[in-house]
Amino acid sequence: MSIPAELLNIVFVEELKATPPEIEKMLVNGERVIASFKSLRDIGAITNKRIIYFNKQGLIGKKIEAYSIPLRSIDMFSSENAGIIDFTTEFQLWTKVGVMKMSFPKKVDVHNIIRAFSEYIL
């Protein structure tokens, strides 16, 4: 099996006020959600230990591919904040298995995400 050059490209469209139950079920002792997000059909969260992402597939979304990316597997990250014309803030993460991109709506305060990545990666 070859590892793709780009592991994931996640585009979130909204920050959620409450953590979805699917995410809550995956949390381990001592793990806390920093922020939860949704895209058109998918959901995800950034915790103090990992990135959790549920990719709903198929016509009705019954088939779900789940990703759990430990923050300790991230070697490096970059962030590009939204400008006047841009609508998204983008993160690029270099992990042990490939590159991952995440986009967030302009209105999301990404400082908590940057702080979490910095705290748990360094």
Image (cartoon, helix red, strand yellow):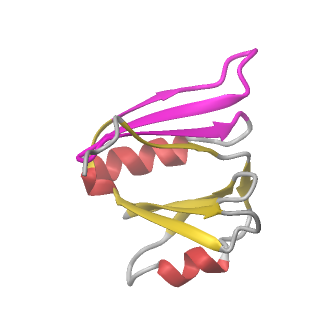
Res 93 → quadrant = top left
Residue 49: x and y in percent read 37, 64
Residue 48 appearing in the image? no
The residue that appears at 66% across and 47% down in the rendered structure is 12
Q: Is residue 46 above or below residue 5?
A: below
Residue positioned 31% across, 41% down in the render = 98
Identified at 60% across, 38% down, the residue is 103
Corner quadrant of residue 89: top right
On-image quarter of the C terminus: top left
Q: Eyeballing the image, is 107 above or below 30?
A: above
Which span is picked out in magenta?
77-106
Determine if the magenta segment contains residue 96.
yes
Does residue 2 appear to the left or right of 92 in the view shown? left
Judged left or right of residue 119, residue 34 is right
Q: Main secondary structure of the magenta part?
A: strand
Q: Nearer the viewer, residue 9 or 23?
A: 9
Q: x, y percentage for residue 30?
A: 38, 79
Badge count: 0
Whether residue 56 is visible here, answered yes or no, is yes
**At which x and y percent is residue 14?**
74, 50
34 drawn magenta = no
**Side (left or right) of 120 relative to 21:** left
Q: Residue at x 52, y 48 (%)?
A: 112
